[in-house]
Every structure is written in C-alpha cells, then in structure tokens.
Amino acid sequence: MENRVVVLSQKDGVLRFKISNTKSGLLLNMLLVLLILFCVAFPLSILFVDKLDIGFGYLFALVIFFGTAIFFARKYLWTYYGAEFFELSESTLHHYFDYRFFKDGSAKRTFNKVSIGYSNCDCPNEIIEGVPDQSENEEWYLGIILDDQPIKSHLFVSTEDIKQLSKLIP
C-alpha cells in the first residue's frame, strides 16, 4: 500500500492537503498493543506483591516503563492514524503531524517564493525542484521549497500525487 495525498480544500487562497500514512498490518498493531499493555501492567502488578518495600528503584523503573508505553502508544497511533498536514497560503506554510488524538511538530513559515520538488533519500536538504519523470522511481518524498529553504515530507508520495500538487501550487 502506498501513502495517499488528499487535497482537503482550496479556497480563499489557501491550499490544504494531507499525506495519509499507510495502515500497518494487524500483526504489528497487535504487537504494539501487547507491548503497551505489558509496559503498564507489569510495573503495576509489583504493587500487589506482599511485603515489598517500594523505594526509589521502583519509582525509577515505573517512569522507564511508562515512558516506554507512551513511546509505543505514539508509534501505534502514527502507524494506524498518522497523517501529515500542509496548509499553504499566499505567504505562509503551516505543517504538522496528526496522530488523531494530538498534533505534533507544528511549524509555521513565511515565504516570498514557493515551488514544489521531490527527493528519493532521507537527507533533509536534498530536494530536486520540479516534477519527477514517469520513467523514474514511483515513490518520492514531497519537497516544498520556500525561498530556497526546503521542507520535506516524512511520508512517501507517488509521482502522480506530485504532479497533481504541482498544478495546484503556483
């Protein structure tokens, strides 16, 4: 399955679109849920052991286990509900990640000139301006170049999606 680009709206000079994350498999989701339950249930079950002195070590382990549970819960929400949102107006770009129950990585940037590009590597500043050829790789990172400062999506998009967005971005 590939990630999808969905244009949410294009009115009043504002283009809103999202890149939806592909849903992960049932096995991975079950594994993440089991890890979350283990990281919460195991340290709490120690409370029910008789004659146990709870001290600093237990509280430290509790923080580690709950932190790990939060990490796995965040991964679960991203793999199941995750999407990247872009709101592009005449002079600003608002970019954030939506985990359904909370948003993260919100950034607003102003610009004078905007263009679209693509990249096939995870390098932050390597974006090729323009639209990829059909004969090339079919999945790319979407790049939006604001005054020669690139912003790259964290999810892959297809060549067709980049072509569709290039027609909408002036």
Image: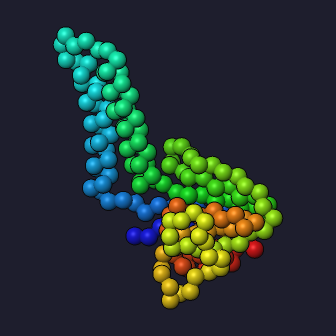
| Residue 170 in view here | yes
Residue at (37, 44) in percent of width and height = 72
Q: Residue at x 64, y 59 (%)?
A: 86
User: Which quadrant would the C terminus be assigned to in this image?
Assistant: bottom right
For residue 152, above or below residue 39: below
Task: Identify the residue shown where x is 53% and y is 87%.
Answer: 134
Q: Position of residue 33 (x, y in %)?
A: 31, 44
Query: Residue 41: horizontal and vertical position, in percent?
Result: 28, 30
| 134 and 55: which is toward the camera | 55
Image coordinates for residue 116, horizontal then vertical, percent:
66, 73
Instruction: Looking at the picture, tell me which residue is in the foreground, 128 or 39.
Output: 128
Q: Position of residue 90 (x, y in %)?
A: 79, 63
Q: Which residue is rendered at x = 28% and y = 49% of the image? A: 31
Q: Say whether residue 11 is visible.
A: no
Q: Residue furthest bottom?
A: 135
Quick check: 35 above or below 2? above
114 sits to left or right of 46: right
The image quadrant that residue 40 belongs to is top left
Q: Quadrant of residue 10?
A: bottom right
**Quadrant (top left, top right, bottom left, bottom right) of the N terminus:** bottom left
